[in-house]
Amino acid sequence: MLFRQHDICAQDKNETVLDLLIRYKIEVSYSCKSGHCQACLLKCIEGKLSSQAMAGIKETLVAQQYFLACQQSAIDIQQAADVDSELLFRRAQISKKSLLAENVLQLVLQAQQNFSYRAGQFINLKHPLGAIRSYSLASVPNEDGLLELHIKRKIRGTMTSWLFEHARVGDEIDIGQAMGNCFYTVKDLDMPLILIGSGTGAAPLLGIARDAIKHHHQGDIHFYHGAGNIDGLYLHNQLVTLAQNQKNFSYHPCISASQTAPGMMRGRCNDVAMAELNVEQQPRLYICGNTQMVKSTQTSAYVAGVPLQHIYTDPFEYKDLRSIPR
Amino acid sequence: MNTVLFERIGGEAAVDAAVNLFYRKVLSDDSIAHFFSNIDMNDQLAKQKSFLTMAFGGPNHYSGRDLREAHAPLVEQGLNDSHFSAVAVHLQTTLQELGVDEALIGEVMAIAGSTHDDILGL
Ligand SMILES: Cc1cc2nc3c(=O)[nH]c(=O)nc-3n(C[C@H](O)[C@H](O)[C@H](O)COP(=O)(O)OP(=O)(O)OC[C@H]3O[C@@H](n4cnc5c(N)ncnc54)[C@H](O)[C@@H]3O)c2cc1C
Ligand code: HEM
Ligand code: FES
């Protein structure tokens, strides 16, 4: 396969374009390695693309032979090239930066006025040195063009360290278009919404809850937020207030550590939510955050009788990038 | 391809009726559920439909070699006779619960059984 000035060769038919490039230590951006984040987009000059490698990519980009390097076997590609970054990213400005909890940053970006998205979708941010990472939107589409993100600090994480320690209000940052299909749709207004999120999985759920309320959703809205300890329930006051003011909204704070506090449930948010699930009421589920939690909850909800098309998920997939993972 | 069986059993509508019932049984069975845990559920549901279409004698594009290839990684993870039987039992009870005629169920089970060696890579 030809790429930049390299001529490299796949090990076997299972090696993906991304793995091949990594094996040759060629600098390319990627994050989830599971076809989710589109950080690994490349352009195919010559070769045969699989449908998997084009899944979820915007049609206009598919037409230009853009593909996901982590989902395409390298053996079928003779030549690939970098993508045109101007096409994928636009400038935004950091307009607010504050801590919601010790390890959770609220980042508000001023996007261009015509930036369009659905509440609960995610965007990619580009680090000044090129790394690309995905973050979910906690805001609802608004005329002010402000985008709210909740960012959990990761030990020596490339993007999170920069955002926590170096990025300043007023700085410019490249952001991609909104992606993902875990968002609120204005239909089935009478059905209950069950929102389940661990850690910053609460970010897209907050967007979805706000959007549902804005569109006068009639069914009950249950927000299950889970964390290891009280500090991790970083939206506590905001959600308590929302529950007081909004008749059909209820907040279920869940703590998995052994000590708990008055009014909080003991256990993981997904276990608590599943125990209270009533399939007869035809709930719509939104499950966001830790990948393991999201997948296992999706499975148990489905097995309990919820149709798959009523379960929306946003797994925060990322690879541990150290050479020796934990 | 045995279109006659496929039509007698109810065609695509029968596949649609059976797929969720069948897949829920598979995922609830701890002895085999782990084979399905790393795969996107929506993709998987589409594959379960392929599985049922095939077992019902419907139009499909799988050769024995395709089945061998699709299941080879599972064989590496220890897929064996007991797992095969477990899937067969879930298929059978699904059809019984849907009230499919016993004779037709017999034909379906024969088709599933004929794939045994390819599935287990024998
Ligand atoms: C669709 C989607 C939506 C997402 N939404 C959100 C969101 O709303 N909020 C959010 O906070 N995150 C979200 N994520 C996760 C986010 O994209 C990043 O993966 C995450 O913030 C880590 O990025 P990073 O560059 O800081 O870490 P990376 O540099 O990518 O490191 C990845 C992991 O490796 C560990 N690591 C790397 N190097 C070392 C080292 N030397 N020592 C110890 N540990 C190390 C890090 O601690 C981290 O856990 C989302 C992911 C996806 C795919
Ligand atoms: C009874 C005979 C069986 C038949 C006819 C059959 C048929 C199929 C078919 C047609 C596919 C789709 C392949 C594709 O499109 O990629 C498939 C995939 C799969 N089957 Fe089977 N199967 C059988 C038994 C089993 C058993 C016993 C297990 C494990 C307990 C199993 C686990 C899987 C899994 C996990 C996949 C998905 C593989 C992937 O996505 O990589 N199957 N099967
Ligand atoms: S989509 Fe390929 S790395 Fe995320």
Image: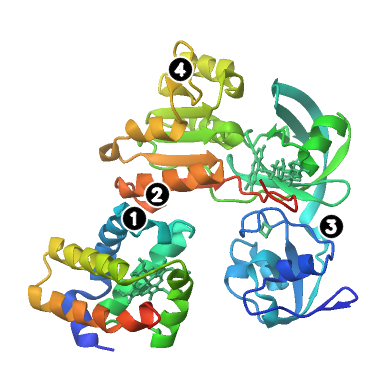
Are discs 1 and 3 both within one chain? no
Secondary element at image label 2 = helix
Residue A123 x/y as whole percent? 69, 46
Label 3 – label 4 distance at C-alpha: 47 Å
Secondary element at image label 1 = helix
Residue drawn at (56%, 22%) of the image: A229
Side (left or right) of A147 relative to A24: left
Whether residue B120 is situated above or below residue A324 in the rendered picture: below
Label 4 – label 1 distance at C-alpha: 31 Å
Q: Which residue is mark 2?
A: A299
Are discs 3 and 2 both within one chain? yes
Q: Is mark 3 within 8 Å of ligand 3?
A: no
Question: What chain does badge 4 belong to?
Answer: A
Q: Amino acid at mark 1?
A: Leu
Are discs 4 and 2 both within one chain? yes
Q: Which residue is mark 4?
A: A264
Residue A19 x/y as whole percent? 71, 67
Q: Amino acid at mark 4?
A: Met
Side (left or right) of A300 relative to A143: left
Earlier-in-chain disc, 4 versus 2: 4
Earlier-in-chain disc, 3 versus 2: 3
Closer to us: A274 or A314: A274
Q: Which residue is mark 3?
A: A86
Residue drawn at (71%, 71%) of the image: A17
Earlier-in-chain disc, 3 versus 4: 3
Q: Are marks 3 and 4 in contact (CB under 8 Å)?
A: no
Q: Mark 2, residues whose alpha carbon is within 10 Å: few (<14), some, or many (≥20)?
A: many
Closer to us: A70 or B38: B38
Whether residue A206 is situated above or below residue A87 in the rendered picture: above
**Residue A54 in which image quadrant:** bottom right
Label 1 – label 3 distance at C-alpha: 44 Å
